Image (cartoon, coloured by chain):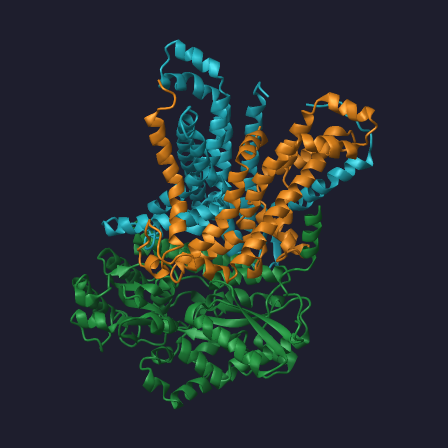
Amino acid sequence: MERRTIFGHLWLPVALVAPQFLLTLIFFLWPAGQAVWSSLTRQDPFGLHSQFAGLDNFVFLFTDPLYRDSIGRTVFFMIAVSAISMSLALLLAVFADREIKGRFTYRTLLIWPYAIAPAMAAVLWILLLQPRIGILGVWLNRHGIAWDYHLNDTQAMLMIVLASAWKQVSYNFIFFLAGLQSVSRSVLEAARMDGARGWHRFRTITFPLLAPTTFFLLVVNFVYAAFDTFGTIQALTQGGPGKATETLMVKVYRDGVVNLDIGSSSAQSVILMLGVIGLTAMQFRFLGRRQTT
Amino acid sequence: MKRRTLLAASAVTPLAAMGRARAQSGKLQLVWWHSMSGANGEEINRLAKAFNDSQSEAEVQAIFKGGYADSLTAAIAAWRADQAPHLVQIFEVGTGSMLAAGPATKQVWQLAKETGVALDPAIYIPGVRGYYSLPDGRLASKPFNSSTAVMWYNKDAFAAAGLDPEKAPATWPEVIAAAKAIKAKVGTPEMGAVKFPVTSSWMIWAQLEQFGAIHDLPFATKANGFEGLDAELVFNGPHQVAQWDRLLGMAKDGLYEYGGRDTVPDALFYSGQAAIGFGSSAGRGDIVRNAKFKWAAAFLPIDPAVTTNPINSIIGGASLWTMTTKQRTDAEYKAVAHFLTFLSSPEQDAHFHQTTGYVPVTFAGYEKSKAEGYYDKAPGADVAIKQLSRGTMTANSRGLRLGRLAEIRAILYEETEKALQGQQTGKQALDNGVQRGNRVLREFQKSVGG
Amino acid sequence: MNPHRDPVAHTILVLGAILFIAPLWLVFVGSTQDSAAIARGDLSFLPGHEGFGSYTRVLNGPVPRMLMISFGMAMAIAIGKIIISVLSAFAVVFFRFPGRKIAFWLIFITLMLPVEVRIIPTYSVMAGMGLINTFTGLWLPLIASATATLLFRQVFLAIPDELVEAARMDGAGPLRFLWDIVLPVSAANVAALFVILFIFGWNQYLWPLLVATNPRLDTIVIGIVKMVAVETETDWSAVMATAMLALLPPVVVVLLMQRWFVAGLTEVEK
């Protein structure tokens, strides 16, 4: 979309764009370039020696069963978090859309978690499920269920999925609610008068009309699960026990910041960058096809 | 806009005063990063304050930086940003990495040479000195807190299980027998808070690295890495596999409870939940403070199938490394040297040892404690130093010098945690540890141009 | 069917509300209970007897400073990003200048690189600029992304031509136009964006973790995670009091600005 440009100044717009442009250069393009360069090197932790290593880092990653495990684990995590979070949000949005008493209160109560940091969500879930002090965790252990997500792979994964999905429900809820509210009432009325019952109406009319919102949320949830959950996972399990909760992002942190293997972690970052670019490109391509707005 | 300018202005003066060496008082500010919390952390603060009060040239600021691993990472990152602290406490397994640090550190012999302050390596006991020296005897970092692994046990629990509380199990079969006796009585009122017989802090260090040392088994070739960067890991020998199978078997039988990594399981012992807790001799301070039962320290048990004459265990703990920045002045380095001298004086060494449970690193400190009758007042406080000096040291019990050893330990934790959940055998865990660990070693070797 | 009586809806929504209020309630009551009791596993759903003692304990330590750092950082990010984006979007929409297309696309690219992915090289860049361990280092890299610019571009494109023409005929220069017309028209978007960015800034974890090694620059989120990291000797009711304090500002902001914020959020992503 264009508009008839109205001002003919030359230096003014350049000056106006300059700050953002400079920031983009310094904090996006240059680091991205550095990441690509580092991914082709082998460095010691202190950064004193740096050798060109060609594609060694990438080759190692793709032949490393642990990296492949990490990819699989991250994909599983992304799907689990998105599925749980979106279904719960949709369910709540459908009912919050109805004309019932107190619906504004419900909405407020369901929106507030948007304000929580992912790392804070972890702290809240620790209070619920930590084996020794968490109110539910202690209850489970006292009733014979050996609950300790520090020591059990499956429990650890369950824990991070729950904490991550929980936090994201409010975001999805906001969008689903907005989407539901934009479904024309008259269309729904017509369907109701045609005899379509609640669930049938939902399945054949409402849900398809929500498709753009759903697709959009799917991409956002995927990116959230892949990256923003870093704080949650670090606070809960730090990627353990073993590697049970080590997603790709946790692995980048572990290899880059903890083990100071700059070459490998840069290679991993480059791979992640390509993944995000792919996802975003897909999102824009699809959303670009929408007729409205 | 106004807020923005305010923020911009405040950003010009960095909050950290690390770049500036002299504070209001005119004294040189020395920054010391350490990783001691709890009772030991208070002792560190006391040391800093005592030094500050004893002279007017410099002021040491002790900052708790988190665990050893985090602290090492932070120190390296800080150095890369030209913001390294003057002194940082680096755990023993970081020694290999720090020796490859080149201009990032000033090794002790270098500090002595450049500042003219005498820092004599001969004052330190051999087991400690050897770990932190170059092959030719020059001292690289200042030995600070050295411990070894010991077996802490709950005497009250032993009595309640029908075992002799004065006689600690000396072999692994005896440990298992004791554990079974304890397990049989768990839940009874005499057993009190005990929930399970055995746990271990620092599991890899205490059960694998130490096991190898006292039984004269190698951890890696090339004298555990002391003789070259091309060392290969060999800790998956049959005796070590047997040790791992033993622990995994105990875990399955409910005799051994894995409490987590590093120091996390400490609380399990001093809170009374575990009757036997393997851990650092330096856990003494927290045990004295928290344990509500009678306890004692004992030598690590041996596996009679391997040997009946164990030799010395290796040290754990940390040393102090001096780091450099582009603007650090000679006066600051001199002040650091003075601080190191202060720390190794007999009074401070003895006090530190007696308060924390770390061994006295200097001969003079040990002699002073003996002369003061400390070991009569605190029986068992010399278990650590006795175990460290036991027998004749061999290439297998001198210690470990491997680059990225912290990462190798993390790998071993991961593999062991998998085995504890029944996903693989002890042999597979150690074999995987060797394979993954060797790759790390080769990467380190290549990265430092070795 | 009576639209106001809907037991199914109420049940589901009440359960949902409980799911999202319970942890918050737990933190609140936990902050009034005795730490030793909590450490023993006796955390209770009912308020304890320690009253607000934990808050006094907590406010005497590093927590007030951490709250200030978080606040400063969140404000800097929100305000900084809004200013930069408004200026860029304005330039790209209302002018024709050489390199305009390139500038736009380069800025657009930033959408594809979340901060976590470029984290380590960004650290090196900051180190090179001497911004490690500084307050500026906390927020500067985080205002660089283009999400807000795209939003404002949408909004500015939708400004009716009549308004633009009117301004032109009045002889108003571009900056006047920006100040008198464009900004007031976009006020609702600015408000919504402010909420979103404030929360984004307040909740940052990975970046402040890396760039600030001096504990004096810890944000409140980092502070809390550090507190729970040492699970053995934790003063739990203090942790919970800190958590309440950490949650308060963003939650208050969201609740107060709820209407604009929700409208703005769904607007941003179109």
Would you place residue A241 above or below residue C144 in this image? below
Question: Camera-side residue: A71 or B18?
Answer: B18
Q: What residue is shown at x 47% (from left), y 28% (from top)?
A: A176
The image quadrant where one finds the C terminus of chain C is top right
Total residue callouts: 0
Question: Camera-side residue: A226 or C225?
Answer: C225
Would you place residue C197 above or below residue B335 in this image? above
Which hue is chain B drawn in? green
Would you place residue A262 above or below residue B271 in this image? above
On the question of residue A56 being in view, the answer is no
In the image as oriented, which residue stretches furthest toward the bottom?
B371
Which hue is chain C drawn in? orange
Which hue is chain A drawn in? cyan
Q: Residue B178, percent across and down?
A: 20, 68
Q: Residue C108, percent across and down?
A: 65, 34
Q: Is residue A30 left or right of residue B375?
A: right
Q: Is residue C96 left or right of residue B354?
A: right
In the image as oriented, which residue stretches furthest toward the right?
C171
Q: Residue B397, percent across and down?
A: 39, 73
Q: Residue C69, percent across and down?
A: 58, 54
Q: Quadrant of residue C240?
A: bottom left
Q: Is residue C69 left or right of residue B305?
A: right
